[in-house]
Image (cartoon, grey):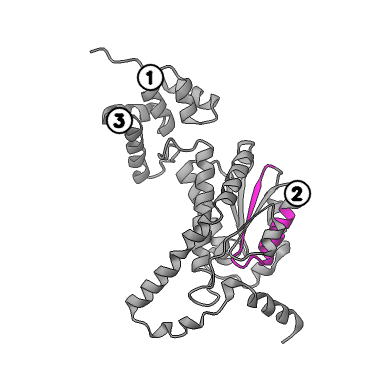
Amino acid sequence: MNAPYRTLRAQLDGLSTEAHRPELAAVDTLSTVELIRLMNAEDAKVPTAIAGVADRLAETVDAVADRMRRGGRLIHIGAGTAGRMGVLDSAECPPTFNTRPGQVVAVIAGGTEAMLSAVEGAEDDGDAAVRALDGLGLRPEDTVVGISASGRTPFAVAAVRHARAAGALTVGLSCNSPSELGRAADIPLEIVVGPEFLTGSTRLKAGTCQKLVLNTLSTAVMIKLGKTYGNLMVDVRASNEKLRARSRRIVHLATDADESTVETALDAADGEVKRAILMILAGVTADRAAGLLTDHDGRLRAALDTAPPAPTPTP
């Protein structure tokens, strides 16, 4: 075994995500229901591990939201499963929160091909990560979240180091502590979920952890940015029949208006849920509702607080 591989072997031997669990050596002999229950019990450990870093995660949310208010972007970057989790989160933000094109971005080692199949060696190419970030025109207002189960993936580590040197906020999301990625980042999010059910298969607990953390991060940031009203998705982009039905339902839940009133408001608001709600609750025109939302950076609750109360119907 040559020296570089001995070094890598030693690194992997020291990672909790790579540790072998002898007590599971006969897992292939279990009944199907035993196998499922055992895997489920392993998965249940992940939310508890995330709860242990709630304060650090809250710090991250506030820092990201502050930069996005100033026009910054949220950029996820990683390789393999970690990269795919970043792509998934970024792809879901436009239909869920009506984020602007390019407001939440993902970079995966190996490019779009790596979403569907493994691109061997891509995770080791730190220079490619630097080129990808340079191609995005990285700015100090941006946040770069490097994602790596091991915390040592060269692609993610190089990205975070480069982004930090450029003045962007950097977050290192890993499942080992301490980690090279965590040391490279402004904010280390090191969530130790322990050895995997299958030795080294970090698409399991580590992948679940990454998905849950990214869900929490992007959702909490969008709430802070006023993309919701209570727990209603008032910035939903109605791009298909299901979402158009959901838009009507959300307007009804926010206003308790009848179906005809909801339809009229949504038509006048060009399908914009926030504007329709404001029109109904404040009794203003579509143009006035648009102006109020612009004045308050799209925050529906703030716009409602300053709008005149809707006129009381005459008995």
Quick check: 242 above or below 108? above
Query: Which amino acid, by three-letter code, is at mark 3?
Result: Asp
The label on residue 256 is 3
Stretch in magenta: 141-163
Cα–Cα span, label 1 and label 2? 48 Å
Q: Residues within 10 Å of mark 1 (few under 14, many from 20)?
A: some
Decide if residue 307 is in sight here.
yes
**159 within the magenta span:** yes
Q: Position of residue 240 (x, y in %)?
A: 38, 45
- The N terminus - image quarter: bottom right
Q: Which residue is mark 1?
A: 283
- Which numbered tag is attached to residue 166? 2
* Image point (59%, 42%), residue name: 62
Label 2 secondary element: loop
Q: Quarter holding the C terminus? A: top left
- Find residue 302 and report its horizontal and vertical position in percent: 49, 27
Looking at the image, which is closer to me, 93 or 201? Answer: 201
Circle nearer the N terminus (1, 2): 2
* Mark-to-mark CA distance, 2 and 3: 49 Å
